[in-house]
Image (spheres, helix red, strand yellow):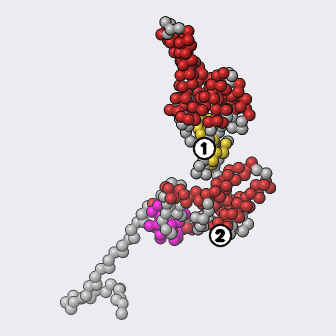
Amino acid sequence: MSDLVTGDAVVLGLRPARLPSRALAFTLDLLVYGTGFVLVSVGLTFATASLDDAAQAAVTVASFLLVLVGVPIAVETLSHGRSLGKLACGLRVVRDDGGPVRFRHALVRGAMGVVELLLTFGSVACIASLVSARGRRLGDVFGGTLVIRERVPGAQVMPVPAPPPWLAGRFTGLDLSAVPEGLWLAVRQYLTRMNQLDPQVGAAMAARLADDLVARTGAPAPAGVPAAAYLMAVVHERQSRDAARTFGSPAGLPGAGVPGGGVPGAVPGAVPGAGAVSGAVTGTAGGYVPPVAATLPLPPAPVPPAAPAPVTPSGDEPVRKTGFAPPA
């Protein structure tokens, strides 16, 4: 990895191409340009057969410079540093600051390439590339360029370990707005590689990162909580908040971050709509609502039959003794 600093003070991490890949790319380019030079030379031989020897020699030199020098410079300029061989090998020529090459860079590289590649059969370029820390030949040094690898193997992203279950949800009220991104990156890198570190070194790093987090959040860590577990829980809380801002809930489901599925005052683990049967919740042991019973509506309460209207006896009808004494 080569750290290049641009004019805006931005550090670029580039992978310089080494000698084997550059030699393979040059060989492919040389085969293409050499084949073109042979075809052009044969055509010019028949076209200049009537000329004298001096004229034929001038035409041969001109065709050599045009095909083996001019064409590579034009291709490198128009393709921004990617010739056919470099494209096949996943390489590219860039400036020292990481920007695309221009005509003057390609011209210097092409002019120096005649000496160190064609006239010396690549021996000077190989020696310069082996001596250089970034694998540059003389054309790259004088032209201010660098050949880099465009196709690099993707790094496997290791997930952050989950915090212990007894720490889940204990940092929901923590203020994480003052924690910089550099500290988050350092904590993530430690958590993904803590199993590869020496136990003493890992414990010291965890303690230092935990102290930095405590200083940024302004809230002390819970007593008795290991530093690594504290870091896991805080990172998990931040990921949950990011997921909630993006998807509306930490798990991408509506109301997954609120106990009871987003219903205020609902019982954790109850299905949506269980808050309507609060009477069944009150009498249940432990506050648990069975999923099936929670979704069924309560039957209506039975209505007692209406009492019959009292009959007042008149003077014409005899009073019948029924054994019922009216209330006083």
Q: Is residue 63 left or right of residue 16?
A: left
Q: Secondary structure at mark 2?
A: loop
Q: Is residue 3 above or below residue 315?
A: above
Which residue position holds label 1?
97
Q: Determine if residue 236 is in view.
A: no
Residue at far top of view: 50
Which residue position holds label 2?
219
- At label 1, the amino acid type is Asp
Judge whether residue 223 is colored magenta.
Answer: no
Residue 181, located in which quarter of the rendered image? bottom right
Residue under the point 53% across and 25% down = 71
Q: Is residue 33 above or below residue 210?
A: above
Residue 91, located in which quarter of the rendered image? top right
Give whichever of 35, 40 is nearer the camera: 40
The magenta-colored residue range is: 266-285
Judge whether residue 279 is colored magenta.
Answer: yes
- At label 2, the amino acid type is Ala
